[in-house]
Amino acid sequence: MIDSRLHVLRTLAEHGTVTATAAALHLTPSAVSQQLRLLARDLEVELLRPEGRRVRLTPAAHIVLRHADTLRAQWEAAQAELAQQSTALRGTLRLCGVSSALATLAAPAVARLRETHPLVEPLIVEEESAECYRLLLADAADVALVLPGPEAPPVTDARFEQSPLLTDRQDLLVAEGHPLARPEGVQLAEAADQSWVVKKRNNDTYPLLTAACAAAGFTPRVVHQVKEWYAVSSLVAEGLGVCLMPRMVPLPQHAVLRVPLLGDPVPARQLLTAVRRGSAAHPLVTAGLDALRDAASTHMAGG
């Protein structure tokens, strides 16, 4: 019911160019340009002005976006209120998130939902955090499990409701017999001269690594880049480097050791839930958030 062209305008405001907007929305640049021209014509205002290779939003465009965010939140609230009129909880609940959070939290949460609400059909999709926010805005997901980072919107972003769910400490992963394989723990700065194994830079964990190392006073010497934690652990087991591993990630059966990190602050990542603003009161979304909080509490109690 909300004009989809407003979402195109919002995406352009974030990305700055028609080409980048088209890539983010999986559209062609010509389709993006056409939608924005039609929106400007219907509103009878100028929305964009060329500025080199980029475009600049006019004051009128910023007014439109401010009201669009309010309209979207009100529409979500209206849908939530209508859904509350039903006596039975039914429908599809779409969850997305980073892999470790899906495995540790979403899986048991979905299992609980299927037991308590058999008419609810949960669907899970694994994505990095930036893509999860895009899925929420495109109405392709209802609840996201995300990590704050450089590409994530701030918690003050009017389009989302974001809430802390779980603080996940990080450990130093080293090969058995490594000089830093001390069960009592080490300072992160003691690994400053090590080679590092990381997940690829387009992954949520990389900015967490660089931020933690910067706080400890060094820049990590990244030698190996892989995609999956199993591969990371394999390389560490062979003595090819060390890595930071979130405590939530299960430890593969390799000759490696988790070494607790000492100091203040201890490197950790904050896991958040994110939903479209106004949608948290929808019975399906409420049930999903409650199940995730229960799963997080159970995980923390067991940890």
Image (cartoon, rainbow, N blue to C red):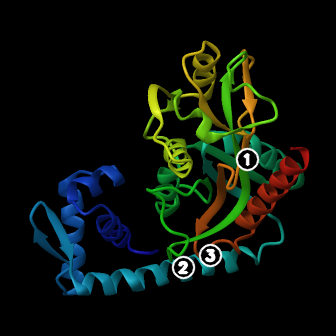
Residue picked out by circle 2: 73
What is the quadrant of residue 250 in the picture? top right
The relative height of residue 60 versus residue 177 in the rendered view (above or below) is below
Instruction: Say which amino acid is labelled 3.
Output: Gln
Query: Of tags 2 and 1, which is closer to the observer?
Result: 1
Residue 149 at least partly seen? yes
* Residue located 49% across and 41% down the image: 203
Q: CA distance from mark 2 to mark 1?
A: 25 Å
Find residue 220 and report its horizontal and vertical position in percent.
48, 36
Q: CA distance from mark 3 to mark 1?
A: 24 Å
Q: Earlier in the sequence, mark 3 or mark 1?
A: 3
Quadrant assignment for the C terminus? top right
Q: Which mark is residue 79?
A: 3
Please state which of residues 54 and 108 is positioned toward the viewer in this rendering: 54
Residue picked out by circle 1: 106
Please state which of residues 125 and 164 is positioned toward the viewer in this rendering: 164
